[in-house]
Amino acid sequence: MDIIKVSSRSVPKSVAGAICAVIRSGGSAHIEAVGAGAVNQAVKSAAVARTFLAEEQIDAVCIPSFAEFDVAGDTKTGIKLIVEKR
């Protein structure tokens, strides 16, 4: 399991490249985002990765869920996206 942490300043195309690398190697990418800006960038990254992979005839799906993360000693609720081959 590869965890990719996304912030509000993450570049979606770069994160998408990391997602694609994990999918191509046969794994599933676990993306973690806390906060509205980070979730926005994570969802855009998953969409871009799906587009990149579709060009290679790889059908990727995204499974969203809520998760709790420890951020500087505080527990925060965020979004976890799992991107994997269908």
Image (cartoon, grey):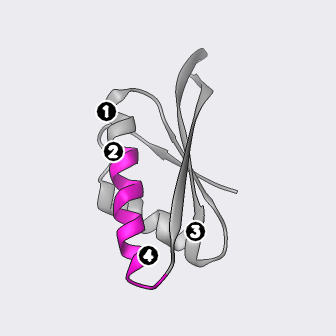
Q: Residues within 10 Å of mark 3 (few under 14, many from 20)?
A: some
| Residue contact between numbered discs 2 and 3, judged by CB atoms under 8 Å | no
Magenta: main secondary structure equals helix
Label 1: element kind: helix
Residue at 66%, 68% (x, y): give it: 27
Residue 62: give x, y in percent of width and height: 52, 54
Q: Which residues are magenta?
A: 41-57
Please report the residue visible at 40 percent of the width from the left and 26 percent of the height from the top.
35
User: Which of pointers 2 and 4 lies earlier in the amino acid sequence?
Assistant: 2
Q: Earlier in the sequence, mark 3 or mark 1?
A: 3
**Mark-to-mark CA distance, 1 and 4:** 24 Å
Q: Total marks drawn?
A: 4
Which amino acid, mark 3?
Answer: Val
3D distance between C-alphas at marks 3 and 1: 23 Å
Q: Crowdedness of circle 2 by 10 Å Cα count: few (<14), some, many (20+)?
A: many
Check disc 4 and report its element: helix, strand or loop.
helix
Q: Is residue 75 visible?
A: yes
Q: Are marks 1 and 2 in contact (CB under 8 Å)?
A: yes
Q: Look at mark 2 in the image and give the residue it sits on.
A: 41
Q: Mark 1 touching mark 4, by CB under 8 A?
A: no
Q: Crowding near pointer 1: few (<14 within 10 Å), some, many (20+)? A: some
- Say which residue label 3 marks: 22
Relative to 60, residue 47 above or below: above
Q: Residue at horizontal 46%, vertical 29%?
A: 34
Q: Looking at the image, do the residues carrying marks 4 and 3 touch, with CB atoms under 8 Å apart? A: no
Drawn side of residue 1 relative to residue 16, left or right: right
Of labels 4 and 3, the one closer to you: 4
Residue corresponding to mark 1:
37
Instruction: Residue under label 4, please give it.
Output: 53
Q: Give the CA separation, mark 1 to mark 2.
A: 6 Å
